[in-house]
């Protein structure tokens, strides 16, 4: 059940996002757009409730429950940023808006940008772990929740690997592009 809910929430995210942006820029329906975009976080609530119900119903935790926590954490930390990115792209492409913001191309500005992304990844990891620990506490049966603890340790690879980008941009910064006129 949980894997289907995760997939449904991901599909729902993009459907609500695209419908919200189309409502705003193509159909000029600002209120509808706002309602659709405000509905996006409801998908997270649905996923959280489904995971809790599944575990409280006697399910043994596995990779799917860990993925649900990781999805929720990503959504909490990067969801608003993803929506802003899509909004800027959509506005530029379909409504004649300004070109979307791009991260710095090089130099220490790019290194600072990469460190900011890495810190967000660490925060998302922390939120996912907090959700998983909450589920472990809620179920209170180590024989059914051991996979959640294992998932937390396995997921530690994500911020560890992501650390390579800010370190590389800090130690070997690319030269910033210069505008030639």
Image: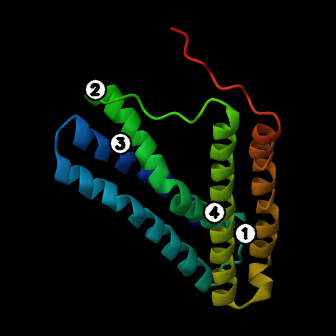
* Residue placed under numbered mark 1 in the picture: 62
Q: Earlier in the sequence, mark 1 or mark 4?
A: 1
Residue 107 position, x and y percent, is: 69, 33
The chosen color scheme is rainbow
Horizontally, is 57 left or right of 118 in the view? left
Please tell me whether mark 1 or mark 4 is closer to you in this view.
Answer: 4
- Front one among 91 and 15: 91
> How many neighbours does mark 2 have within 10 angstroms: few (below 14), some (14-19), or many (20 or more)?
few
Give the residue displayed 57% in from the left and 74% down from the top: 51
Q: Quadrant of residue 120?
A: bottom right
Residue 176 position, x and y percent, is: 65, 26
* Residue placed under numbered mark 3 in the picture: 18
Horizontally, is 154 left or right of 92 in the view? right
* Residue placed under numbered mark 2 in the picture: 96
- Residue 66, compared with residue 57, is above or below; it is above
Q: Determine contact: label 4, label 2, CB under 8 Å.
A: no
């Amino acid at each position: 059940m949980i894997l289907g809910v995760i997939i449904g929430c991901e599909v729902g995210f993009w459907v609500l996002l695209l419908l919200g942006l189309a409502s705003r820029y193509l159909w000029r329906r600002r209120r509808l757009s706002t309602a659709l975009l405000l509905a996006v976080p409801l998908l997270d609530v649905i996923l959280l409730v489904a995971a809790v119900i599944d575990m409280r119903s006697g399910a043994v935790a596995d990779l799917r429950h860990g993925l649900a926590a990781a999805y929720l954490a990503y959504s909490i930390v990067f969801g608003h940023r993803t929506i802003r990115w899509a909004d800027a792209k959509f506005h530029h492409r379909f409504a004649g808006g300004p070109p979307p913001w791009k991260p710095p191309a090089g130099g220490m500005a790019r290194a600072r940008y990469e460190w900011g992304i890495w810190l967000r990844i660490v925060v998302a990891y922390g939120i996912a772990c907090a959700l998983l620990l909450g589920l472990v506490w809620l179920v209170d049966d180590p024989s059914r929740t051991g996979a959640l603890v294992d998932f937390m340790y396995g997921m530690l690879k994500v911020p560890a690997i992501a650390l390579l980008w800010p370190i590389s941009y800090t130690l070997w910064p690319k030269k910033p592009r210069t505008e030639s006129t």
